Amino acid sequence: MKTIILTLSAAKDLDAVPRDARERVESGLNRYAITGQGHVKALQGRDGYRLRIGSYRVIFDEDATTILAIYIGRRATTTYKRS
């Protein structure tokens, strides 16, 4: 199992998500950290990955032991422009 770390901005993003969606995002992140399963793709044009959970996206970096969540929010035209 990998450790999940949220940046300050990702923690604020998660707090802004409605409760039912927040629970799905948290469970999707935990599932990925434990099993490595999830709808993950490498980002193009920059380092990192995205995890799709319904209409929400988690932009993150990872190494062998940790997942660093950088952005959590709904898919929009600006989703992948944030850092």
Image (tube, grey):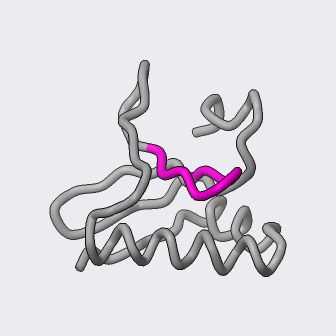
The vertical placement of 38 against 81, above or below, is below
The vertical placement of 62 against 78, above or below, is below
Residue 40 x/y as whole percent:
40, 47
- Which corner quadrant holds the C terminus? top right
- The rendered magenta stretch, by its main secondary structure, is classed as strand
Identify the residue at horizontal 35%, vertical 63% (top origin).
67
- Which corner quadrant holds the N terminus? bottom left
Residue 18 x/y as whole percent:
83, 73
Left or right: where does residue 74 sit relative to residue 80?
right
Identify the residue at horizontal 43%, vertical 71% (top origin).
5
- The image quarter containing residue 15 is bottom right
Q: Which residues are magenta?
A: 50-57
The vertical placement of 18 against 67, above or below, is below
Residue 66 x/y as whole percent:
28, 67
Left or right: where does residue 27 sit relative to residue 56?
left
Identify the residue at horizontal 73%, vertical 67% (top origin).
12
Residue furthest top in the image = 45
Identify the residue at horizontal 39%, vertical 74% (top origin).
31
Residue 44 x/y as whole percent:
42, 23
Q: Which of 21 and 61 lies nearest the eye of the viewer?
A: 21
